[in-house]
Amino acid sequence: MSSHTVLEAQSVDDCIIDQKWDKYTKEDHAIWGTLFERQQKTLKGRVAQEYLDGLEALGIGPEGVPNFERMNARLRKITGWEVVSVPGLIPSRPFFQMLANRQFPAGTFIRSREQLDYLEEPDIFHDVFGHVPLLTNHAYADYMNEYGRLGLQAMERKAVKFLARLNWYTIEFGLIRKPEGVRIYGAGIVSSFGEAKYVAGDPSAHELAFDLERVLRTGYYIDDFQATYFVIERFEDLFDLLKAHDMMALVDAIRDKPTLTPFEILAEDEVIRRGSGEYWRQFPKTKTKLK
Ligand code: HBI
Ligand code: FE
């Protein structure tokens, strides 16, 4: 288990720490600046405009690590969300509870220069540069809030695995179709140098129209790029879908069906792009099991 994970805390308050913004070093701020500038270049013309609007609205820039207090003063006024500092990954219960409270848990540590391209667990760059800007978008913010409420229900029904897939294929690795083309919105792509380039320029992955049941059935590997990305039409669709379905009934209906791998395409899939699979030719690349 890595050094930043809070293992036993089950209550929200037990997971929250101070950001201690004054403790960040010049090097920390410089690493933030390097990551920020690099991603801006990689994302240009590929990321959803709503994401860029959020960066600007919150004043998140290359200058250095954002000060949560200052950022929250703006964020609260826009959608009522706030960012709270946590030491790293936290247990599912406080995680879901925070989202239900319109609180987004963000790590406070920043990766080292050696970890610029990949680190195992979310650092402040992944959480704040990746996740927070879209919390200024009302439709997406409402989805994140509803997702938290559903997560708490899922815990009672042993269905967290399915909510984790929904999280994976929207909040972390989601794409959205715009008139000008498919655009990135998932934080895991937005904050990753390698995966943003892969999504923007590599034809290997499938792009399928988002379908809730299909996403709940599709597993994922946590240690490599995606073989399939799901594409929504509007951020409003995410919230509307959750409200239109009895998620737990849907989970019960599919729970015993076989888990789909991210490599396959089903006859009923609406295929936006059939991937070449090239990147995955060397399969098994992954060293983890299907989630
Ligand atoms: N903790 N800090 C943090 N950030 C997450 O995204 C997170 C977490 N704990 C649990 C968790 N995500 C997953 O259980 C959900 O994505 C399903
Ligand atoms: Fe994340």
Image (cartoon, rainbow, N blue to C red):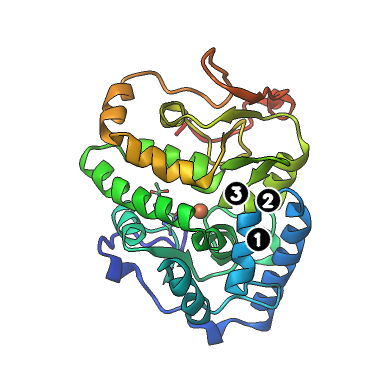
**Circle 2/circle 1 CB separation < 8 Å:** yes
| Front in this rendered view, residue 281 or 82 | 82
Q: How many marks?
A: 3
Q: What distance separates the C-alpha of mark 2 from that of mark 1?
A: 8 Å
Ligand 2 within 8 Å of the CB at mark 3: no
Tell me: residue 139, above or below residue 210.
below
Residue 79 place in picture, x, y as percent: 44, 66
Is residue 59 toward the left or the right of residue 201 in the image? Answer: left
Query: Is residue 130 shown to the viewer in this render?
Result: yes
Residue 208 place in picture, x, y as percent: 59, 28
Q: Which residue is mark 3?
A: 185
Quadrant holding the N terminus? bottom left
| Front in this rendered view, residue 76 or 174 | 76
Q: What distance separates the C-alpha of mark 2 from that of mark 3?
A: 6 Å
Q: Residue at x 36, y 71 (%)?
A: 16
Q: Which residue is mark 2?
A: 47
Q: Which residue is mark 1?
A: 52
Considering the numbered disc 2 on the image, is that residue within a helix, a strand or a loop?
A: loop
**Identity of the amino acid at label 3?**
Tyr
